[in-house]
Image (cartoon, rainbow, N blue to C red):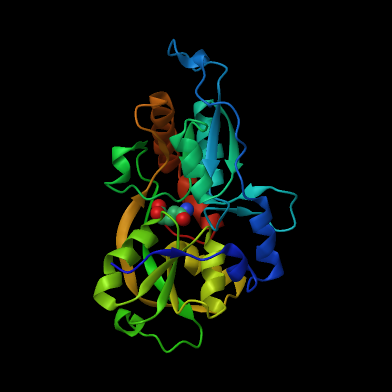
Amino acid sequence: MKQLTARPLAKAAAFVAAGALAVFGLAGCSNSEPASDSSTEGGSTEGKTYEIVADNAFAPFEFLQEGSDGTYVGVDMDILAAIAEDQGFEYTVDNCGWDAAIGNLNTGQADGMIAGMSITEERQENYDFSDPYYEGGQIMIVKGDSSIASYEDLAGQTVAVKTGTQSASFANSIADEYGFTVVTYDDSPAVYAAVTGGIDAAGFEDYAVISYQIENQDLDLKMVGDQQQITPYGFAVLKGQNPELIEMFNAGLANLQESGKLAEIFATYGIEI
Ligand code: GLN
């Protein structure tokens, strides 16, 4: 297998527009006490405030509202709010970014995670997922004027992905076959910057996310080929932890589906489900 390298963020950041740069500065989860405290030991969730972690630059699922002072919006944020209201539970959400969010979930510093997270078989060994609320795959992206038109054209090139994502595992799974090297970045804007800046010849990203970016952010990127690994998205807890949270999420999600509220939330961000 080709060597997997991680590019220093600074190198890619140099190519990022000022607006996207602001996102980097906001990353980082608070490292508080483990979220699951003794108050839930008796099975009671009364009075508990669930700590949820999320991605920070993954529009339209979660992203910093333009012109706001640290308010995150998006499909995931709206679904979470609507389900909590429907089911009557309290929560806080920390948009600390994909990698940090997984870290905090793994160490029990967070109770749950929502981040356009694909329900993969591998992840199901470590996490319990809710019922799916969306389904999507990944797609290759190249710079607007790139002549790369297929995976075959990637021979000898580098390909940008976000650490620990399905895009990363897909790129790694075909790297040998097509003779390219996978380069990992900490967040999605860094992946886009690496491709628009000509650092890497191509990248992979979730289809819904890159479609939204291209449409709304005027990025100099185009998609090539078909979606890969179409997989459902779900809300996650650490395996065996906070089972009541998954139950409430599922019950609330079913209500949102039935009332049409779920479709309404997606429609707000231009997605038809
Ligand atoms: N859906 C992808 C995954 O779960 C990417 C998620 C993300 O980058 N927030 O791997």
**View extreme (left): residue:** 177
Q: Is residue 39 left or right of residue 118?
A: right
Which quadrant of the view contains residue 17? Answer: bottom right
- The location of residue 196, given as percent across then percent down, is 55, 78
Residue 82 appears at what percent x and percent y? 54, 38
Residue occupying image coordinates x 57% and y 78%: 197
**Residue 268: x and y, percent?**
56, 56
Relative vertical location of residue 266 with respect to residue 16 in this rendering, above or below? above
The image quadrant where one finds ligand 1 is bottom left
Q: Quadrant of the N terminus?
A: bottom left
Image quadrant for the C terminus?
Answer: bottom left
Q: Residue furthest top?
A: 42
Residue lying farthest front? 3
Q: Is residue 219 above or below residue 259?
A: below
Please report the residue visible at 34 percent of the width from the left and 51 percent of the height from the top: 232
Q: Quadrant of residue 90?
A: top right
Total number of numbered labels?
A: 0
Is residue 142 or residue 99 the one in the foreground?
99
18 on left or right of 147: right
Q: Is residue 271 above or below residue 261?
A: below
Picture layout, residue 87 above or below residue 230: above
The residue at the point 50 percent across, 23 percent down is 36
**Residue 18 image point, x, y percent:** 71, 68
Q: Is residue 231 left or right of residue 141?
A: left
